[in-house]
Amino acid sequence: SQTIHQWPATLVQPVGSPLSLECTVEGTSNPNLYWYRQAAGRGLQLLFYSVGIGQISSEVPQNLSASRPQDRQFILSSKKLLLSDSGFYLCAWSVGQGGDTLFFGSGTQLSVL
Amino acid sequence: KQEVTQIPAALSVPEGENLVLNCSFTDSAIYNLQWFRQDPGKGLTSLLLIQSSQREQTSGRLNASLDKSSGRSTLYIAASQPGDSATYLCAVQGAQKLVFGQGTRLTINP
């Protein structure tokens, strides 16, 4: 069966520090991978999605970046965090685009102070 | 640009009642609509997925309907239980991405 792992579960970082959140998927090949952010009182916002190794599409211009160094690994990064980067970050995967359900990781609560 | 709206934002009902959560979307050109459940501080769990060609899907006490022409979906929960308390989100799949509503926070009172 397929599983998705996301870590860390919580993270407190000072403004201006770097960020690296990691997500891995097991039990499937060539998944579509997604990073979402859920800010307090707001809906889920798609940040990045990837249909293959090295292929990253950005939905929202910001100081975050994503990389996919391996087929089932998706990394969210920042060189310098801003206060506005605080939120709940969710990684997700799907088999294909358009008709398949999305499976989510357990999320990372990021607080930038 | 697709917009998804969920009403009400919060709902509190006594245990045992049947209830309906609403979701509306502005662009009817969709591939599917999904309902998710999110417990506090947790990720999302997929409940039901309705393809654009379907009218409804059922899973246990849950029934989701889809009316693409009017841009509406409902999630019906029968015989609600305290364990159903969570935030319920609907999401609409377009050509490239999934657009989420802001969710309905449901509380079932024992």
Image (cartoon, grey):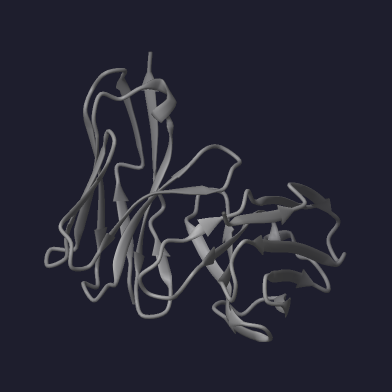
Left or right: B8 as drawn, with respect to A30: left
The mark total stands at 0
Residue at position x 29%, y 66% in the image = B32
Q: To which quarter of the image does residue A28 belong? A: bottom right
Return the residue found at the far bottom: A55
Q: To which quarter of the image does residue A1 belong? A: bottom right
Q: Is residue A25 above or below residue B79?
A: below
Q: Is residue B10 above or below residue A15?
A: above
Quadrant where the C terminus of chain B sits is: top left
Residue at position x 58%, y 57% in the image = A2
Q: Is residue B82 above or below residue B57?
A: above
Left or right: B48 as drawn, with respect to A22: left
- Expressed as whole percent of the image width and height from the top left, the position of residue A107 reads 64, 51
- Expressed as whole percent of the image width and height from the top left, the position of residue B33 reads 30, 61
Q: To which quarter of the image does residue B66 belong? A: bottom left
Residue at position x 18%, y 62% in the image = B54
